[in-house]
Image (cartoon, coloured by chain):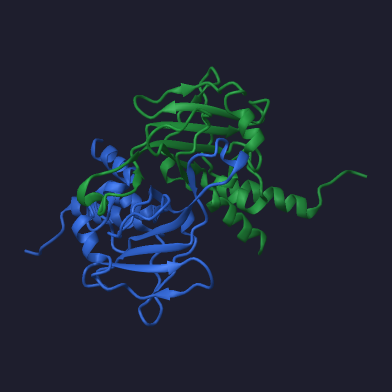
Chain colours: A blue, B green
Amino acid sequence: MLAAWNTSEADEASDKASLLKGMILPEYDERGALLRPENFETRTFVGTSLGITYSTDPPAKGPGDFHNVYIQPEAFKYYVKYGEFPEKTLFVMTNSPASRKAGPDLINGRGHFAGKATGLEVSVKDSNRFDESWAYFLFKTAGPRRAAKALPTGTCYDCHAEHGADDNVFTQFYPVLEEARKKEKSK
Amino acid sequence: MLAAWNTSEADEASDKASLLKGMILPEYDERGALLRPENFETRTFVGTSLGITYSTDPPAKGPGDFHNVYIQPEAFKYYVKYGEFPEKTLFVMTNSPASRKAGPDLINGRGHFAGKATGLEVSVKDSNRFDESWAYFLFKTAGPRRAAKALPTGTCYDCHAEHGADDNVFTQFYPVLEEARKKEKSK
């Protein structure tokens, strides 16, 4: 007797493929370095933070940087539906200085907003390419589009593996994603 | 001689219509109250802030709330291309408490992230419906979907009109939108 997928497995595979159709994929140069993601600002935003750093140094003066995190809309929908990040998931986190404007702009002069992004931290899930499935990259936003090599596993991967709530991802800081997943599960 | 549009005006009108095709519009109930926006999390994110308030009261303890601001992707593209917000533009701003998690979640225990949203502040541009073009609404996120009446002009409109950098909108806090517009203009 031939082994065969049952219908529900075939349906799921087909649904997954259909969810991912058209997803912008990570791009690499001929050395295997990741090209800086572009036009990610219209992708799905999953969370923001101010002043959270990986550093164990004493607190810097000031509030620190805003981090805004984006994911491809197709990977967002896939995670919400299936509870896992698909291959080729690409997270972009922007680093923006916490800005203030004096006078009327801030109305009462308190608080900070995320200014223009100066740097990007990027993670990619690509098991064919990276032994640990996920790899991590740093980019500056200024200047021409450049490629970056994956950082050594000790720099990012280890901490993500240890502290990320789900599949190396800090979903605990992404309530937009977590709430959408919860809502889907409760259907 | 008949008055006629010239070709470039016709082309622009057609391009604008095409940019706005499929845009999710504000929904009202039979009393003219705005229905709470839903599924806005996958729309285009334009900016975040922490601790900026409209209040002139003395600073509260703690960092305040995160505000994350979304706009329909079609209205985003329209603004980037034409430098104006189209009719039926709908901004959603979420209010989220600044959260901390002890221990490993925050790695070093510093900084805050935007927790689950508890309230929405919404603005809509709809000149057929509102004398001042823009109207403002408040929603809670909990519970069934409700409708809200536009707030009196003294509550939101006046301040937006006075301090918003462009067309009653606080674009000065939305570098994502401003940078995309600048890039388009420099083409």
- Figure quadrant of the C terminus of chain A: top left
Residue A142 placement, left or right of B140: right
Depth check: give the residue in front, B128 or B14.
B128
| Residue at 41 percent of width and 36 percent of height | B64
| Residue at 59 percent of width and 52 percent of height | B178
B145 versus A46 height, above or below: above
List the single residue furthest toward the bottom.
A31
B20 versus B143 height, above or below: below
List the single residue furthest toward the right.
B1
Q: Position of residue A100 (x, y in %)?
A: 53, 47
List the single residue furthest toward the top.
B31
Q: Position of residue B4 (x, y in %)?
A: 84, 46
B184 versus B59 height, above or below: below
- Tally the marks: 0
Q: Position of residue B92 (x, y in %)?
A: 49, 37
- Figure quadrant of the N terminus of chain A: bottom left
Residue A106 placement, left or right of A20: right
Depth check: give the residue in front, A32 or A4.
A32
Depth check: give the residue in front, B67 or A167.
B67
Q: Position of residue B1 (x, y in %)?
A: 93, 45
| Residue at 59 percent of width and 21 percent of height | B152
Which of the 4 image quadrants contains residue A179?
top left
Residue B187 placement, left or right of A162: right
A89 versus B74 height, above or below: below
